[in-house]
Amino acid sequence: MNFLKRSRFLFILLLSVTYGYADDGYRLWLKYDLIRDVAKRDAYARSAQFIAVNANSLVLKSAAEELQTGLRGLLGKTVPIIATAGSRSGGIVLTVNKNVAQPNEEGYAITNRSTNITITSKTDAGVLYGTFALLRQLQTAQPVERIALSSSPKIRYRMLNHWDNTNGTIERGYAGESLWKWFELPETIDPRYKDYARANASLGINGTVINNVNASARFLTAEYLEKVAALANVFRPYGIRVYLSVYFPAPKTIGGLKTADPLDPDVKKWWADKTKEIYKAIPDFGGFLVKANSEGEPGPQDYGRDHADGANMLAEALAPYDGIVLWRAFVYKADPKADRFKAAYEEFKHLDGKFNKKVIVQVKNGPIDFQPREPFSPLFGNMPKTPLAMEFQITQEYMGFATHWVYEAPLFKECLETDTYVAGKGSTVARVIDGSLHGYQLTAIAGVANTGSDRSWTGHPMAQANWYAFGRLAWDHTLSSETIAREWITMTLTKETKAVNTIADIMLKSRNIYVQYNTPLGLSRPWTGAHFAPEPWQNQSSRPDWTAVYYHRADSTGLGFDRTATGSNALAQYRPEVRQQWENAETCPLPYLLWFHHVPWMKKLSTGRTLWDELCTHFYTGADSVGWMQQQWAQVKPSIDPELFANVTGRLATQHKEAIWWRDAWLLYLQPFARQPIPAPFKKPERTLEDVKRLADIYRLR
């Protein structure tokens, strides 16, 4: 190929990358495409003539290289990296300054008060986060001439939890196989590991638990620690520490001991020795995540001990190191007379103040299990002496897997902004977990990851926004759902204003649309073996709280779970101000009505409709609203990459079909109890209850 032909080929290749044709989603929100506005591009270029780094470390090297990569794409030219700015002006200076005025070590300041843009932090990691913040400013077309931006994370440990297994599968994963290729590690390092680290660092995520909470002891063997260490080596330059979920009986299964009793001296020694071995392989190891005495997983209660005994034993093993224990509060016993809603509170509340200072209790956002809409867990605010971490689920276990478009930021915000009233008005869940309410020294937030081997990382391209939203809120929970959505759209999909507005509107309404056709009015979603097919009729399982009828309590008199004083009295776990909002069926907000009340079918609600008619209205409106999502999405076609547009279009078609399936399954099952017709103007389902049961049975087949 001669010079002219080669130049032409490279130019065409550059255009294809620059303008994002055939976008498969791999680049996520780190799409540093050429800025088309020439005037703005030139203005940025005048402030980015060089990159100066005044120190040398792996993290600062990553920051400088990321900035160089970003500027090369955005400005269409290579910006040199130099050791010091000296008297030069018109560049970007990355500097660590222990005396910079920031509330914590990871905060950053970006200024352009004199001759250069300066990104300053007390730590290398803070400079890295500031670098990504500056690139975000450029990607979203914000001015930088007089930039004065500072930000600090409100929560110390911001992490993803991967439910990945040794065989490459992912529990509740809907985006392919695990990112971690265990049978190739440590010799082969997939380049994707670095891109994973870059994406997380761009959000300020600083930790990752790489294996399933239903843990395998294999991860604690020397064979696997070498593999984990190889991942840690890739993540370290991006400020990300590796954590492990541990199998509590590991001293028996791989250690040869006769017991795993946390108070046994030999068990304590085994964990201390194992922890020392881990830190020898991974000097910046983050610590342990533990699921114990839950859903069949062994734990300290098997030996007559409590959760504090188990957590404290691990904390003692970590005492010489900078690591923590995250002990999950997702614990509930198979008691046919109990209310699972109350379980975590009953298991942990009395242990407040008994945990080692290295222990954080990790609590799911709601009292049941990542439902599309749940009240906040009553544990939040009720353990003032014990740091509580938030656990959100980014992967869509109960929200349509990878075929339903659901933007989760409104769900996260709804929980974080709810007032617990534990110290008076303003005692929000966010203030509990960020430590400002109770003075926690350790603070943490975790998101169950939605990533996998799929080329787009998350299966559904729009599910990338949930990973992005979790990371942004983990850093700053005061950001609005709309702000985050518009950032993500502009950085990932399009910069065309009308299209951005349309997509943001879809995203901000998507969660409520899903709730309408899936679990309206506080109707708890049925537990299903596949976690996919609607089965409100399910009444057989190895334990009662793994059936659908346990949750919705449908009968000839009404629908819903009575959790007031006349029922399970779960409401007693909340402060009086919270109880007052929910305990009276006449005034309970409709989104939570069936969470707390068994409501008669013909009871008139605040809308003027009966319960049955209100349910029908929600189910039909929700399913029809997916049609609205399709129409809105069709309008942005000229502004979206064709491959990505077609991908989302297909998934919306599936979502519409499945929304009708959920609608029909619920209403056909509930109608014999209610003994009421489908109200006008809604059309009666064209299929029978037996039809939808047969369809659901397909998803139970092996």
Image (cartoon, rainbow, N blue to C red):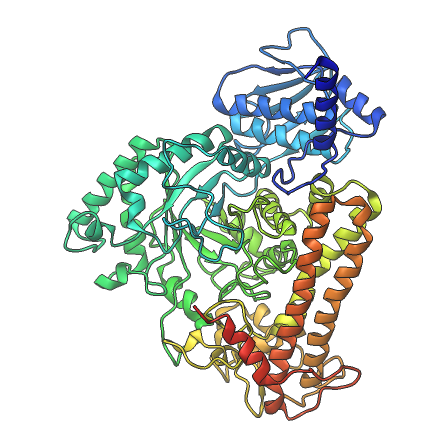
Q: Residue at x 52, y 53 (%)?
A: 432
| Residue placed most toward the observer, 570 or 239 | 239
Query: Compared to 400, does 220 lie above or below?
Result: above
- Outermost residue on the top side: it is 87
Quarter holding the N terminus? top right
Q: Position of residue 604 (x, y in %)?
A: 71, 86
Q: Is residue 408 left or right of residue 495?
A: left
| Residue placed most toward the observer, 678 or 183 | 183
Q: Residue at x 55, y 53 (%)?
A: 394
Quarter holding the C terminus? bottom left
Q: Is residue 170 left or right of residue 296?
A: right
Q: How many labels were placed on the picture?
A: 0
Q: Is residue 313 left or right of residue 175?
A: left
Query: Compared to 206, does 297 lie above or below?
Result: below
Query: Compared to 636, does 494 lie above or below?
Result: above
Res. 701 visible in picture: yes
Q: Position of residue 76 (x, y in %)?
A: 73, 22
Query: Compared to 459, does 34 lie above or below?
Result: above
Q: Is residue 320 left or right of residue 46?
A: left
Res. 588 visible in picture: no
| Residue placed most toward the observer, 13 or 187 | 13
- Outermost residue on the front side: it is 1
Q: Position of residue 44 (x, y in %)?
A: 76, 23
